[in-house]
Amino acid sequence: MELHDSVSLPIVGEAEVWRLGSVTSTQDVARSLPIGSIVLADHQTAGRGRLDRRWESPEGTALLVSFVLEPNPLLSLAAGVAAAEACDPRRVRLKWPNDLLLEERKVGGILVEATQDRAICGIGINLTWSPDGAATLDQPRDDVFDRLRQEIATWTLARPDQVIERWRDLSATLGRRVRVDVSGAITEGLAEGIGPRGELIVDGVAFVAGSVTHL
């Protein structure tokens, strides 16, 4: 693992922000840190999203951050709400399970890795560069990060019903036809709602995981 320009800055309580240059992945660094720690990097050499998909961006063009948090069964939804609020809740919408959309194009994503005693929540947001077909937020990284840190603190402590209600408000998925791919098994139907565990309800069937395409 390659680390450059490491600086730790204290925040609320025992938490620290580790501001790094180049890393394999902020998730890799965060796994060995205590709960409350935050890892912020300029560049990832092996960044990834869900389903082991690559996350690539030139150095300094994205917000790349991982939060070490208490386990939370709704963390993916809570982090999505927090990220949308930090970016711009008037323009950024949420695609189940963990994508941030700007004008129907992906502008960011969330990856949660959980164990019994901790959860590592990685968030990537395109700021000044994006792959073909994706979007850029075009906001200063430090401004977005400062807002995101506060929103994560708020929404990870919110009641489950509050998280689900706000996720519904920000959703780009609910109320439209979708295709859900679960290990090659395809289901198409109407995305009707979000269940109490964050599952997506499509034509009465609950999906706890899967790749979703808006139709």
Image (spheres, rainbow, N blue to C red):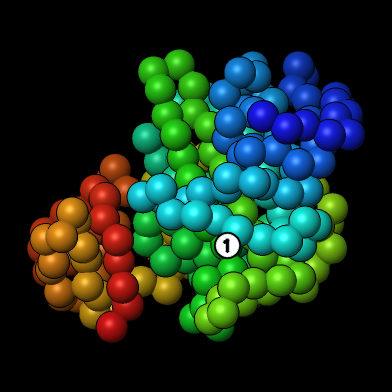
Q: Nearer the viewer, residue 47 or 159?
A: 47
Left or right, 11 with respect to 163, comes to right
Please report the residue visible at 22 percent of the width from the left and 72 percent of the height from the top: 179
| Location of residue 79 with respect to 191 vertically, above or below | above
The residue singled out by tag 1 in the image is 108
Q: Callout 1: 10 Å neighbours few (<14), some, many (20+)?
A: many
Q: Is residue 102 something one can see in this rendering?
A: no
Tell me which amino acid carries mark 1. Gly
Q: Nearer the viewer, residue 190 or 166?
A: 190
Please report the residue visible at 66 percent of the width from the left and 61 percent of the height from the top: 57
Q: Nearer the viewer, residue 153 or 94?
A: 94
Left or right, 171 with respect to 137, comes to left
Q: Quadrant of the C terminus?
A: bottom left
Please report the residue visible at 49 percent of the width from the left and 29 percent of the height from the top: 119
The tally of labels here is 1
Please report the residue visible at 64 percent of the width from the left and 72 percent of the height from the top: 130
Whole-percent x, y for residue 159 in the image:
46, 39
Whole-percent x, y for residue 155 in the image:
57, 43
Q: Where, by quadrant of the figure, is residue 19 drawn?
A: top right
